[in-house]
Amino acid sequence: MRTFTLATMLASGTSALTIPLLGSLTGFKDIPVLSLSQGGKAQCYSGLIAVPVTTTGNTQLNLNLPNNQSSVTDIFTQYLTSTSTLVQTLTGPDATVSGTFNIHAKLCFPLLSLPPLVTPPTVQFLIHGIGFDKGYWDFAPGYSQVDAAAAAGYATFTYDRLGVGLSDHPDAVQVVQSPLEVDIAHALIQMLRKGNLLGTKFGKVAIGGHSFGSIQSVGIASRYPDDVDAVMLTGFSLSSASFGLTFAAFNAALANKNQAARFGALSNGYLVTGSPQSNQMAFFRNPNYDANLFNADDNNKQTFTFGEFFTLGKVVAPATSFKGPVDVVNGQNDFIFCQGDCLNPSDQNAPVTGALFPAAGGKCSTFMLPGAGHALNLHYGASQMFAHMNNFLKSNGL
């Protein structure tokens, strides 16, 4: 068995670690980069994966790219106007999109427990939300579902959604839309189930989403119910009442102007939140987070597209054929899905499973993280949420 030495990587202070390498490096376009998770509990392989995919669910949007920031602001002003017909004006028929897209992903295993020694039976397939990349799930020591999952014996798969981070950035209006992203996720899940990544076949897949990632998770369970064995939704409820407030708070800015050094080559269809204040209002609840994590997140804020904005909820439909267990997790003070209070007028976690997963089985559960805003993973107490999610899977035999 081949070995690879990682020098000065262990947070514990160990100067080197000899890690057994997998017998197969299939699935990645190049030799994947080997690294440790933030807390050193998992060993990870990351790189680009070429994903051929076709979707028939995108929408032909009658929207030209805005010429400047004033035009961007005007689009959102029109959208938020009380008598707005913007969505109806822009929305055309369904559209087919085909292509092979490069998706940057990271597959992690519990430290020293990877194949061919041990194959974790379940992989957690984790999808980040708008404004983040895959690092949301492995942000810092103590703020990492990747670490917590590895400590509990799970593999994790995280990736930059299309149009985000190190993945491809195609047409931001007609291509990077919610339906295509659901089909990309489906293709990636099939790779994991069939052993097409690192020669490792997973018998069970538990999907976990955050925010838009949870919307995607609902879409996957609805359209491809056999893809996943359990669903974990975080930063999600049935209410869209504060979506308008959220996008007003975003103060959407052209990514290529607001973050020119990072996104200067992108088209005017790629957007970011306009300021640190925008990020705080939408994602964080003061004072229940570490200011250093907030600054790190704001410095690494990620793009979203007009295509995503106008197709956010298109994939949401009851997953009537999904029969696995469902877990719903929110921060008590989530702004985006609860307008700052997920207990008003009652527990907003409670109705989700019955409404969207009527055939759910097993031991379904909910969890509310006290004092947390929308970006739960970056708030104090995140480790409680990670433990809850892993215990939910354990209680269902996954």
Image (cartoon, rainbow, N blue to C red):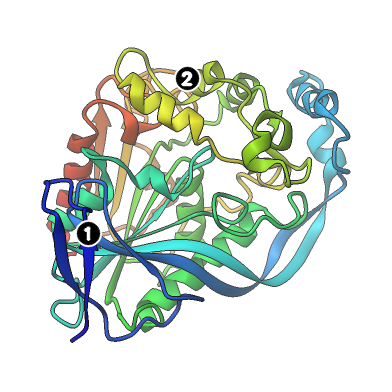
Q: Residue furthest top?
A: 287
The crowd level at tag 1 (other Cα within 10 Å; few <14, some 14-19, many 20+) is few
Relative horizontal placement of residue 48, taking residue 169 as reference (left or right): left
Amino acid at pointer 2: Gln
Q: Position of residue 256 (x, y in %)?
A: 72, 37
Residue at x-position 66% and y-position 46%: 308
Q: Of residues 276 and 349, which is closer to you in this image?
A: 276
Quarter that holds the N terminus: bottom left
Q: Which residue is mark 2?
A: 280
Query: On screen, 294 above or below 115?
Result: above
Q: Quadrant of residue 287?
A: top left
Q: Position of residue 270 (x, y in %)?
A: 70, 42
Q: Nearer the viewer, mark 2 or mark 1?
A: 1
Q: Quadrant of residue 174?
A: bottom right
Query: On screen, 201 above or below 300?
Result: below
Mark 2 residue element: helix
Residue at x-position 49% and y-position 41%: 132
Q: Is residue 323 visible?
A: no
* Numbered mark located on residue 7 in the image: 1
Q: Position of residue 230 (x, y in %)?
A: 30, 60
Quarter that holds the C terminus: bottom left
Relative horizontal placement of residue 214, taking residue 179 as reference (left or right): left
Residue at x-position 73% and y-position 31%: 257
Q: Position of residue 166 (x, y in %)?
A: 54, 55
Amino acid at pointer 1: Ala
Q: Earlier in the sequence, mark 2 or mark 1?
A: 1
Q: Is residue 77 visible?
A: yes
**Between marks 2 and 1, how big is the CA–CA gap?**
37 Å
Mark 1 residue element: strand
Query: On screen, 334 above or below 390?
Result: above
